[in-house]
Image (cartoon, rainbow, N blue to C red):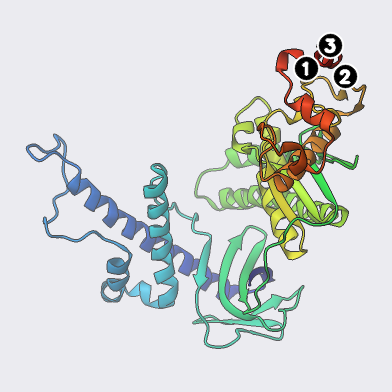
Amino acid sequence: MILNYTYRIKPDAKQVELLTEWLETCRVSYNYALRELKDYISSRKCAIDRCSLESEYVMPADYPFPGYQQQQNNLPKAKKEFPRLKAVPSQVLQTNIRRLHDAWDFFIKRGFGFPRYKKYGQMKSMLFPQFKSNPITGWQIRLPKLGNLPIILHRPILEGFIVKQVRVVKKAVGWFAVVTIESELQIPDPVPHGHCIGVDIGLLSYCATSDGYSEPRRKFFTSLHRRLKVLQRRLSKKKKRSRNYEKARIKVEKQYNHIAFRRKDYQFKLAHKLCDMADTIFLEDIDFRIMAKGFLGKHTVDAGFGQFRQILKYVGKKRNVFVGEVDHRGSSQTCPNCRIEVRNELEDRIHFCPECLYETDRDVASAQELCNRGIEMLSTQGLWGKEIGCQVGLSGAFCLDKWRRAAMPSGDAGKPSLYFLN
């Protein structure tokens, strides 16, 4: 079992200067390794019988690809040529090169997103991957070549866990240490059990459950946007790379940190509230990146639905609450009571079914439909909608009439009485 705990650390002025210098050294080494990688690619991408009209980087034909192992083995040689590398712990430099090749492997896997150079100040974290003993003693944490740093342990390290690695993160509001702890304890993944609910996510109400609970949406960005506009306007009038420019930039970054912290704190509290309501939670498997490209993209990004889904799964695993995803297509256009198709426009906020006269809030009806689909997925192994001999017996959740209406032709969905009379 592996957990990550984030603590605030309080380095003194000398330690802050040293950490800042280490981050800059990591940025330079990252860019140097990336330049070597791009030079190798440039020397291999030209045609066999001709070269570029401008310039072409020439490397020997037997020169090996600058992979992680080769660049890591070249670090001792680089320390002799660049003495500033000796000040940084060796394992920190190795993990920095590992970060570059993780980005390269991800680029090769998905086909886009070539690694980019890090600009000045863009390197925000460094990783200490190994410790001989527990680095946290009392209210201090000991890091290699840095000494003891005060740390605010707002939550204790659990018994039976050992510290595996520590990532130091620089933010405008201060320095943080992300401590990774590990235990041999094996916790199985949660299984569906107990009370089930469906959760519909939207912009009018942040989430609505099948039990009728609706959580209003919090506007994290728009509520603090006025202050952010003032700070950004002041920043635009400063001369770049000046001291006043840096002071104004830090104020803008602090405002962004404040917005992100408020959003994350709210999402964790909401995830615990949902886990208190049920033992099994079903979410819609929607791709929120597509929602963010619409005309409500700014509000969708502000809501952070993707982050909330990840947080809910994390909290559910810790609290033994099963969190699953079901098909979201047509969930707001289906009556959760009789399962026929009911067309609702975007401005229709009340669901009313002309077949069974069921009326409720639209978001609640969508959540109830998600709950129905989740139960069907578990009880019928995803066989709902397929006409098989044992369909009704496998469902275990719906009556025969509902199954017949689900199998009814779409053209007869609005007139079930005539359908059965015929």
Marks 2 and 1: in contact by CB < 8 Å?
yes
Q: Give residue 275's position: percent from left, percent from top.
A: 82, 56
State the residue in front, 338 or 81: 338
Toward which corner of the image does residue 88 lie, by quadrant? bottom left
Q: Secondary structure at mark 2?
A: loop
State the residue in front, 201 or 32: 201
Q: Is residue 241 above or below residue 1?
A: above
The residues bearing labels 1 and 3 have C-alpha atoms spaced at a distance of: 10 Å
Please identify, in this view, whether the residue under mark 1 or under mark 3 is nearer the observer.
Answer: 3
Residue 418 disc label: 3
The C terminus lies in quadrant: top right
Q: Is residue 88 above or below residue 412?
A: below
The N terminus lies in quadrant: bottom right
Q: What amino acid is at disc 2?
A: Glu
State the residue in front, 127 or 395: 395
Toward which corner of the image does residue 388 lie, by quadrant? top right
Q: What is the count of numbered marks?
A: 3
Circle 1 is placed at which residue position?
Answer: 413
Q: Is residue 112 left or right of residue 66?
A: right
Residue 373 in sight from this viewpoint: yes
Query: Residue at the spot x=42%, y=54% of the render?
Result: 103
Q: Is residue 372 above or below residue 254?
A: above
Q: Residues within 10 Å of mark 2 (few under 14, many from 20)?
A: some
Q: Residues within 10 Å of mark 1 (few under 14, many from 20)?
A: some
State the residue in front, 376 or 117: 376
Q: Secondary structure at mark 3?
A: helix
Q: Residues within 10 Å of mark 3 (few under 14, many from 20)?
A: few
Q: Earlier in the sequence, mark 1 or mark 3?
A: 1
Q: Earlier in the sequence, mark 3 or mark 2?
A: 2
Query: Residue at the spot x=72%, y=48% of the render?
Result: 378
Circle 2 is placed at which residue position?
Answer: 355
